[in-house]
Amino acid sequence: MATSPSAPPPLPPPSPWYTHLYVQVLIAIVAGVLLGHFAPTTGEAMKPIGDAFIKLVKMIIAPVIFLTIITGIAGMRDLGAVGRVAGKAFGYFLFFSTLALIVGLIVANVVQPGSGLNINPATLDASKVADYSAKAHESTLVGFLLGVIPDTFLSALTDGNILQTLFVAILFGIGLAMIGERGDRLLGALNDVSLAVFKVVSILMRAAPLGAFGAMAFTIGRYGVGTLANLAMLVGTFYLTSLLFVLVVLGTVARLCGFSILRLIAYLKAELLLVLGTSSSESALPSLIEKMERAGCAKSVVGLVVPTGYSFNLDGTNIYMTLAALFIAQACNVDLTLGQQLLLLGVAMLSSKGAAGVTGAGFITLAATLSIVPDVPVAGMALILGVDRFMSECRSLTNFIGNAVATVVVARWEGQLDKAQLDLALTGRAPPIADVV
């Protein structure tokens, strides 16, 4: 007599609302804003708290990327499949990164956010952007090619350069895959180490509310909410453009792939709030890797797409670069021809890749782009220096969502997406990740 299949075990009762990470981070952000606004000096003094959390996360990013890529590539065995996944991922990155640059260019021409400011470049304090301009050489293609190769194998894991970690991890993963069954014991050990590393991530995430509080208190205390009013047109245009890019462009991509962009955003709400609070998408990278695997994306795909996307799929940064560059040109009454704008777009495409892994990448890539297109004064960057911190939050959020969408899309293209598991995760019916959310 056939036995009926046993019913799945019931989900555990929901935890109290105040124990959820996203609630704690949201409360911390609000508290940081209030402290920075009403006690600016005290708010500025909170900077070390935010910096300490970012350092904690950066401490664990290299091991997470290294282990995720190695176990993903070696676990696939088929190097042809590795190349296929990488090719599809980079094709996706190139298309949508270019599209983001074009969107920023079109919006800047239509809205004209800098028109009417009539700024004389000679009156600007160029010394304020000197440090960024000095680092701009790192964003050139040559700087990118030299920067991707570490001095030693171990320095790739200790210097905090994501590109170098990617480079070494991919090489090691390919090497491990090539030795076949002889590498099984090492692969098993690395999988075990990976579990321990992600447990460390869950421990570090408990400090996320403190990090978000410190970073937000400093930002509001240093720059003040009133800073936004000075350049409200640029900031508002950038936020609206990024929102439309996420909802319309990425939303259409998501719909074509059978899922809702709004449900994906809701699924990643804790990570997005963390990104908002810290102005850094890197702070949520380890959690994104774990959540995308939980959402039905194959580990091998997640291991390749998410880390590389952090360096090569920067939708928010790309929108910012063309929009900000044309804002500066308009503010300084510099009329750019279509050819010059297309040159600006091409240079921005290269410099956005070259600055991957460089601290303050958004502002540095803008400096690199403007330095190669001399008609737009680099000194004009002083106009947006005061509000760049506020726009960095939107850049990071857009970059983060873009990489989450890219992971699902590439997994689906590869037939490595568990659609049922994705639906469970996006509708909130999947079991929670212990100690993380």
Image (spheres, helix red, strand yellow):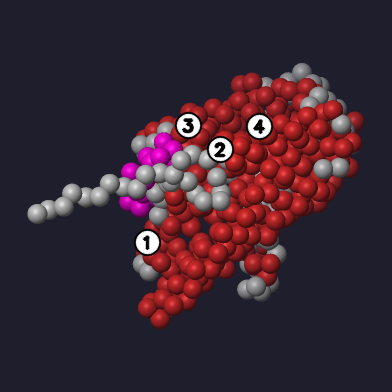
What is the distance, in whole Å, between disc 1 and disc 3 at their CAs? 31 Å
Q: Nearer the viewer, residue 322 or 67?
A: 67
Picture quadrant where residue 82 is located: bottom left
User: Marks 4 and 2: CB-CB under 8 Å?
Assistant: no
Extreme-top residue of the structure: 116
Left or right placement of residue 265 versus residue 395 in this view: left
Task: Mark 3 and mark 2 in contact? Answer it, CB < 8 Å.
Answer: no
Secondary structure beneath label 1: helix
The residue that mark 3 highlights is: 262
Cβ atoms at labels 4 and 1 below 8 Å apart: no
Residue annotated with mark 1:
81
In the image, which is nearer the foreground, mark 1 or mark 3? 3
Quickly name the residue at label 2: 16
Membership of 127 in magenta stretch: no
Q: Which mark is residue 323?
A: 4
Across and down, in percent, residue 108 comes to: 64, 26
Q: Is residue 104 left or right of residue 47?
A: left
